Image (cartoon, rainbow, N blue to C red):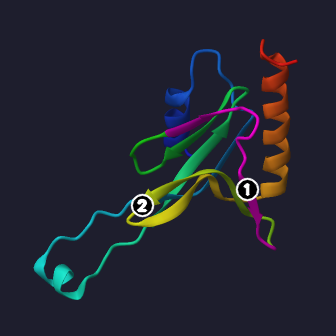
Amino acid sequence: MTPAEQQMLAAALREGETPLWTGKGGGVAAAPQKTGLLSRLFRKADSAALTSMLYAITPKRVLALPVQGGDAQEWFLMLGLVQAVNERPDGGGDIVFDFEEVNGSKVPRGLIGISEVAQVRNLLNDAIDAAYQASPWSV
């Protein structure tokens, strides 16, 4: 991580919160809609654009921070958080938590475009289990 990314992560963490894992990948950002005459004439619609993301897993939540600025996302660790794991032959891939509609398309949200996805999935599953066991509602 660059010093700027370290500062961004530090600003997003709560007091006493320590990351179990940090990584970078690509997340989806909405491209602005073109409203000019030529765009309307040719009916061009912008698609979702891939942006560099900084990810962190803490003992209680997952953070997704756009490196170029924008809205951060967070998911609290709970059973059922992971909806899908898509692993590529090179070992990278996505851990999908939910979906968002961007420019008329359903796009995944979560840890997108990360390396060593199986290793991160195992760490995330362990963190979810630990958070569940620490919960006063676990049985």
Per the rendering, the mark at residue 59 is none
Q: Quadrant of the C terminus?
A: top right
Q: Is residue 105 above or below residue 77?
A: below
Tell me the element at label 2. strand
Q: Quadrant of residue 13?
A: top right
In the figure, 55 relative to 108: above or below?
above
User: What's the distance in space between the residues labelled 2 and 1, CA to CA?
Assistant: 19 Å
> At 11% from the left edge and 80% from the top edge, which residue is drawn?
37
Can residue 32 be seen here? The reply is yes
- The three-letter amino acid code for the residue at tag 2 is Val
Viewer-nearest residue: 14 or 76: 76
**Of the residues under marks 2 and 1, which one precedes in the sequence?**
1
Q: Percent position (x, y) of residue 31? A: 35, 64
Per the image, the residue denoted by label 2 is 102
In what element is the residue under mark 1? strand
Q: What label sits on residue 84 in the rendered view?
A: 1
Magenta span covers which residues?
A: 73-89
As drawn, is 4 to the left or to the right of 42? right
Residue at left offset 84%, top offset 31%: 129
